[in-house]
């Protein structure tokens, strides 16, 4: 009945069993065999079927049946068939029996079997080598590396043409890189892609990266996915994204790929902001069940402002145990207005110690009106160093009138977080601390804060620093502040009304010189109003030095705004190097070093003797000590005592003590205040105590309180307390406030 059923045609096409030319013999229909072979869950053939088939075939057929059973991983069936054949003298069945035993991890029996046929002269060396490699691989899988190496080496002794990959890989895994290179190179040179990849890895570990690169290329060209990924990473590191993407794409399209190529390509595109292309790749990986791809797809969709689409993928990753998905899932829900759900996921992430989520949770709770609870989480995040949390906490505390708000804003601002600098600057300005506010506002404005640039413009306008104000209003306008343009236009009109010194005409020169001379004399005689009147006449004729002297006179007598206008007019005329120097020094004092340097250099080019020293000091303050030294030395060589003293101090800071001592001595001889004291300090560093005492004694004679204090400290260190007290007393008389405390401390020992 069963045979009749199986041989009936189905739908008039074919039957499960097809008759042959031999009576009562049938073959299975091809599609039936294919279907069973493709089905990983298909039940194994019953042992009875194998035995029935074996009973119908000769020894050659039995070998084929045993091989089929081996291929179907029915090793017990294969063992029985090959053992019977081997026992009856079928030599080639020995290696197959050995492999069947090894697959069942019956290693002792497998080794015993191997040694019974490995010395046989009747068996081809290739078969012996293949079975030895197979046995080595089984031992390696069982982590018996010593035995694995033994059988790999037996295989190569039996047949040196066998693939050296397995022994090379084993040695590489054990860190025996020089030996591994030998075997992997032999295999790679025969064109094996996997060997080329492993050889490249060994060469890289040996520090031979340039030699490794072509082997990665050979492995990749040979279809090895890992080598393709390595090529992708190498080319991406060089910035060759076109090649990098090509290798990752090849890996992603390979049948051997485990989604690594897809993920690497998606990562590369994401890093470059090519989210639309990356999305397709992340989606492919996510739909294939890859949790990393699901997470990355969700994050990419968030970057593209599609939180509703991001949510399910992030939730899938979070529910799969990936904690990295918790915060972005909270963000996706937060953006959709799902505040309670967002709180749940932020809280889960915060409970795991994630400070970014702790900060987000704190901000969310504060926005929901749960301020005290929110501040608690923000404080935790801020204390961990999160500048955004510190800034938000500072905002909340300032709104409550709590002084700690300024503390947290300052911490964040000092960590170069410009939103904190912006809020701190505005707060200080509101408190009347405009001078302290200005550097924070500058920092914020230069980092992109439109409101800070605008506020700076207002402050500078009030201080009559109109050109600086103009710059800040322009900056605010470019950054998008809606009111900056109006202020910029208004300020432009004011600047156009500034004083501009006209050119001195030849026919007016005599009158201008006379007015200047009169003004100069009136000033020296203390007749200030007459001086201002005469100097103004000369300046209006175009006399640049008169304009400069008028600016000094006005500034000295409280008319600062007009004084600055005349000073800039004189400097801008290019005819008064004194005005240029004066303006440069003023700007340096205001911290505007770049503009100050411009004017001081103009003054030096115009012949102002002290300009070289002033330029050196400015360069020193800017940290450009090498340039500073050149200008200070030029001034010192020209007889500028102050330049010699300042350069001496700079050289002392640099540890160039002999040079410093020479310059300081020159400065002291010229009356440079403090030179004798510093000379004493230099002598101490040179271990010349007696000379230090001499210089400090001389400093006391010159009335230098620091020298007296230093000498008192030296005497105290030598235990000469009475002399020390006397010297500290002298220092106190000269104005040293620290000396009094030292006297009290010494007297306690009496």
Image (tube, rainbow, N blue to C red):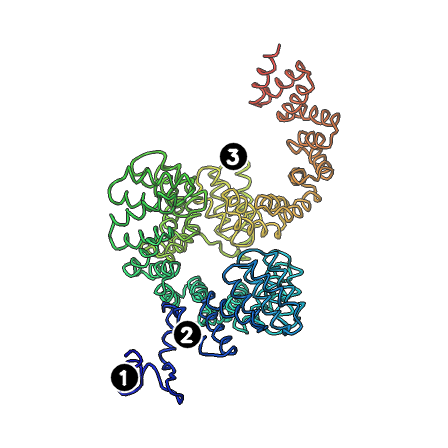
From the top left corner, tell me how far across and down residue 528 is, in percent: 48, 37
Q: Nearer the viewer, residue 577 or 219?
A: 219
Q: Position of residue 620 (x, y in %)?
A: 60, 44
Q: Which residue is mark 1?
A: 10
On screen, residue 143 above or below 45: above
Secondary structure under the numbered disc 1 in the rendered image:
loop
Mark 2 crowd level (few <14, some 14–19, many ≥20, 10 Å Cα):
few
In this view, the mark in front (3 or 1)? 1
The circle drawn on residue 526 is 3
Q: How would you rate the neighbour count of disc 1 (Cα within 10 Å): few for under 14, some for 14-19, many for 20 or more?
A: few
Is residue 636 left or right of 306 when viewed as pictured? Answer: right
Q: Quadrant of the N terminus?
A: bottom left
Using the rendered image of the protein, determine whether residue 355 is visible from the camera's viewpoint: yes
SS of the residue under disc 2 = helix
Q: Are marks 2 and 3 in contact (CB under 8 Å)?
A: no
Give the labeled residue for mark 2: 52
Q: Give left or right: position of 638 versus 546.
A: right
The quarter of the picture where residue 30 lies is bottom left
User: x%, y% of residue 65?
Assistant: 47, 75
Q: Residue at x 28, y 49 (%)?
A: 342
Circle 3 SS class: loop
Of marks 3 and 1, which one's residue comes earlier in the chain? 1
Position in image of residue 453 (x %, y %): 39, 50
């Amino acid at each position: 009945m069963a045979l009749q059923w199986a041989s009936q045609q189905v739908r008039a096409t074919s039957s499960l069993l097809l008759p042959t030319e031999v009576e009562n013999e049938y073959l299975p229909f091809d599609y039936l065999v294919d279907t069973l072979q493709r089905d990983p869950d298909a039940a194994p053939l019953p042992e009875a079927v194998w035995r029935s088939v074996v009973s119908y075939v000769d020894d050659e057929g039995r070998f084929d049946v045993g091989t089929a059973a081996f291929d179907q991983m029915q090793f017990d069936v294969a063992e029985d068939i090959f053992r019977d054949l081997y026992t009856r003298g079928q030599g080639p069945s020995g290696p197959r029996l050995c492999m069947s035993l090894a697959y069942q991890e019956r290693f002792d029996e497998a080794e015993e079997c191997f040694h019974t046929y490995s010395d046989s002269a009747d068996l081809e060396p290739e078969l012996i080598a293949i079975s030895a490699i197979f046995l080595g691989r089984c031992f390696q899988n069982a982590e018996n590396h010593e035995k694995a190496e033994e059988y790999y080496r037996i295989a190569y002794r039996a047949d040196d043409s066998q693939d050296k990959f397995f022994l090379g890989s084993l040695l590489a895994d054990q860190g025996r890189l020089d030996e591994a290179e030998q075997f992997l190179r032999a295999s790679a040179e025969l064109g094996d892609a996997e060997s080329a990849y492993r050889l490249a890895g060994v060469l890289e570990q040996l520090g031979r990266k340039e030699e490794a690169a072509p082997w990665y290329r050979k492995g990749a060209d040979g279809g090895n996915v890992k080598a393709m990924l390595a090529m992708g990473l190498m080319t991406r590191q060089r910035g060759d994204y076109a090649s990098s993407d090509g290798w990752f794409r090849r890996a992603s399209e390979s049948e051997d790929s485990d989604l690594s190529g897809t993920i690497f390509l998606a990562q590369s595109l994401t890093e470059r902001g090519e989210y639309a292309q990356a999305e397709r790749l992340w989606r492919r990986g996510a739909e294939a069940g890859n949790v990393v791809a699901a997470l990355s797809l969700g994050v990419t969709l968030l970057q593209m402002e599609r939180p509703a689409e991001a949510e399910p993928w992030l939730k899938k990753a979070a529910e799969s145990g990936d904690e990295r998905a918790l915060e972005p899932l909270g963000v996706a829900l937060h953006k959709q207005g799902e505040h309670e759900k967002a709180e749940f996921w932020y809280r889960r992430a915060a409970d795991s110690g994630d400070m970014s989520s702790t900060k987000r949770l704190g901000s969310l709770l504060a926005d929901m009106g749960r301020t005290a609870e929110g501040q608690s989480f923000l404080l935790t995040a801020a204390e961990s160093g999160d500048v955004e949390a510190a800034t938000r906490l500072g905002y909340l505390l300032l709104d409550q009138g709590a002084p700690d708000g300024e503390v947290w804003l300052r911490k964040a601002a000092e960590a170069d977080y410009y939103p904190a600098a912006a809020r701190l600057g505005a707060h200080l300005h509101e408190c009347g601390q405009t001078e302290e506010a200005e550097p924070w506002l500058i920092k914020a404005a230069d980092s992109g804060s439109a409101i800070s640039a605008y506020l700076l413009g207002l402050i500078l306008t009030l201080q009559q620093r109109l050109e600086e104000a103009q710059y800040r209003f322009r900056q605010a306008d470019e950054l998008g502040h809606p009111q900056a343009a109006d202020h910029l236009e208004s300020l432009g009109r004011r600047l156009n009304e500034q004083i501009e010194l006209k050119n001195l005409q030849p026919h007016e020169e005599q009158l201008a010189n006379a007015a200047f001379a009169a003004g100069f004399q009136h000033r020296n005689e203390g007749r200030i109003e007459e001086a201002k009147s005469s100097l103004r006449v000369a300046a209006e004729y175009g006399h640049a030095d008169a304009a400069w002297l008028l600016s000094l006179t006005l500034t000295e007598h409280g008319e600062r705004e007009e004084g600055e206008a005349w000073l800039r007019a004189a400097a801008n005329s290019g005819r008064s190097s004194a005005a240029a120097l004066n303006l440069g020094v003023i700007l340096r004092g205001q911290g505007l070093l770049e503009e100050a340097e411009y004017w001081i250099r103009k003054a030096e080019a115009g012949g102002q003797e002290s300009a070289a020293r002033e330029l050196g000091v400015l360069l020193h303050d800017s940290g450009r000590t090498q340039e500073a030294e050149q200008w200070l030395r030029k001034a010192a060589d020209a007889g500028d005592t102050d330049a010699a003293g300042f350069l001496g101090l700079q050289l002392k800071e640099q540890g160039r003590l002999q040079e410093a001592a020479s310059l300081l001595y020159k400065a002291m001889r010229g009356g440079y205040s403090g030179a004798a004291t510093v000379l004493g300090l230099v002598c101490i560093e040179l271990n010349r105590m007696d000379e230090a005492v001499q210089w400090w004694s001389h400093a006391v004679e010159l009335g230098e309180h620091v020298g007296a204090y230093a000498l008192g400290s030296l005497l105290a260190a030598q235990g000469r307390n009475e002399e020390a007290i006397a010297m500290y007393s002298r220092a106190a008389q000269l104005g040293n406030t620290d000396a009094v405390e030292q006297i009290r401390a010494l007297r306690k020992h009496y």
